[in-house]
Image (cartoon, rainbow, N blue to C red):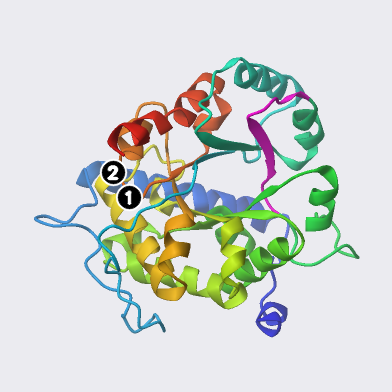
């Protein structure tokens, strides 16, 4: 609610000394995750799948249980690939990247967007050619006003931007964005004409403790509370990004990713309708690259990808976009 937002600031008050400390802590955490994954080899539990607990654990208020509502339920939306360039690039390197993307041949069966840093959006919009669209990496929870450093949904719409990434784990961790704040930001963006790539995902600790489904459902519940209108979900792409796989070089196995995507699709059917669950695109993010995208795309409930590091490599990103051909081959 708005009252919840006012009592929970979007940004933690960090001093100039604390920001480097927070970044160092995050880097150390990712290194620890990678070390843990390297030593264990896999997050899959012996003799079974990793998601061992339903969403009805005490920390989750919903009575939902992640069991597929219909055996023939699957995504029907157009394959979707987003490139999140994060805080990377300069004018020269971005010009080179755009040239590589423009030179690539991308299937007509995929919708694809690229999200450059804010300051380079005009440069990319002037040079990037269809089928690529330009997206934003974030926007403010309110309209225009005395909000130093923020960018409003209205400003993005005025530029001709259609898509925005919200709820990314890096903003949740470094900027203190709670589930409720993320839900309010998503609702505001939708109300003001943007389409939303909504990021959700669990930490390594939550994965290993068997609460992945509960964590993901909590994040989705906060979205549903802020966005109760069925029709609004036609303008949402859900991006499942396990935090332990972002920037670590580790990626969920196709079976692990499919299991969570199936949970999300079942949640959509339970919360809204079978039609909403089938039409809402659920994409995977977390160290997706040109080498693993084909196997991931074969999974029934993986409707595309949100790509980080590999989106800065033009030829690799085009390859990932064309992974839609693997989806078609198993359809």
In the foreground, 62 or 44: 62
Residue 174 placement: quadrant: bottom right
Secondary structure, mark 2, is helix
In the foreground, 285 or 174: 285
Give residue 180's position: percent from left, percent from top: 59, 74
Q: Residue at x 36, y 36 (%)?
A: 327
> Is residue 129 covered in magenta?
yes
> Quadrant where the N terminus lies?
bottom right
Circles 1 and 2, Cβ within 8 Å, touching? The answer is yes
Is 45 on the left or on the right of 231, as rendered? left
Q: Residues within 10 Å of mark 2 (few under 14, many from 20)?
A: some
Query: Does 305 sit above or below residue 232?
Result: above
Q: Residues within 10 Å of mark 1 (few under 14, many from 20)?
A: many
Give residue 328's position: percent from left, percent from top: 36, 34
Residue extending farthest right: 146
Residue, disc 1: 257
Q: Residue at x 60, y 66 (%)?
A: 231
Q: Residue at x 48, y 69 (%)?
A: 220
Is 249 on the left or on the right of 219, as rendered? left
Secondary structure, mark 1, is helix
In the foreground, 285 or 13: 285
Q: Is residue 258 visible?
A: yes
Residue, disc 2: 254
Give residue 206's position: percent from left, percent from top: 34, 64
Is 46 on the left or on the right of 83, as rendered? left
**Residues drawn in magenta:** 127-138
């Amino acid at each position: 609610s708005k009252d919840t937002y006012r009592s929970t600031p979007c940004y933690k008050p960090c001093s100039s000394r604390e920001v480097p400390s927070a970044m160092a802590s995050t880097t150390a955490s990712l290194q620890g995750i990678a070390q843990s994954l390297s030593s264990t080899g896999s997050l899959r539990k012996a003799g079974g799948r990793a998601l061992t607990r339903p969403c009805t654990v005490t920390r989750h208020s919903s009575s939902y249980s992640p069991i597929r509502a219909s055996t023939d339920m699957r995504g029907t939306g157009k394959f979707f690939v987003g490139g999140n360039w994060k805080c990377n690039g300069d004018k020269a390197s971005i010009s080179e990247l755009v040239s590589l993307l423009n030179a690539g041949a991308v299937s007509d069966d995929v919708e694809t967007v690229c999200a450059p840093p804010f300051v380079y959006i005009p440069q990319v919009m002037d040079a990037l050619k269809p089928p690529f669209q330009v997206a934003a990496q974030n926007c403010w929870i309110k309209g225009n006003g005395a909000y130093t450093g923020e960018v409003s949904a209205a400003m993005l719409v005025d530029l001709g931007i259609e898509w925005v990434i919200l709820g990314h784990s890096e903003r949740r961790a470094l900027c203190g964005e709670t589930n409720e704040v993320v839900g309010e930001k998503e609702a505001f963006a939708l109300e003001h004409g943007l389409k939303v790539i909504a990021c959700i995902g669990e930490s390594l600790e939550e994965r290993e403790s068997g609460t992945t489904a509960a964590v993901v459902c909590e994040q989705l519940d906060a979205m549903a509370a802020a966005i109760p209108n069925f029709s609004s979900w036609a303008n949402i792409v859900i991006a499942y990004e396990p935090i332990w796989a972002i920037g670590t070089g580790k990626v969920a196995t196709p079976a692990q990713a499919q299991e969570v995507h199936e949970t999300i699709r079942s949640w959509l059917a339970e919360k809204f309708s079978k039609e909403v669950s089938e039409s809402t695109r659920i994409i995977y993010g977390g160290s997706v690259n040109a080498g693993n995208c084909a196997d991931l795309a074969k999974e029934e409930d993986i409707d595309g990808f949100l790509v980080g590091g590999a989106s800065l490599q033009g030829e690799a990103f085009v390859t990932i976009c064309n992974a839609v051909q693997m989806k078609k081959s198993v359809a």
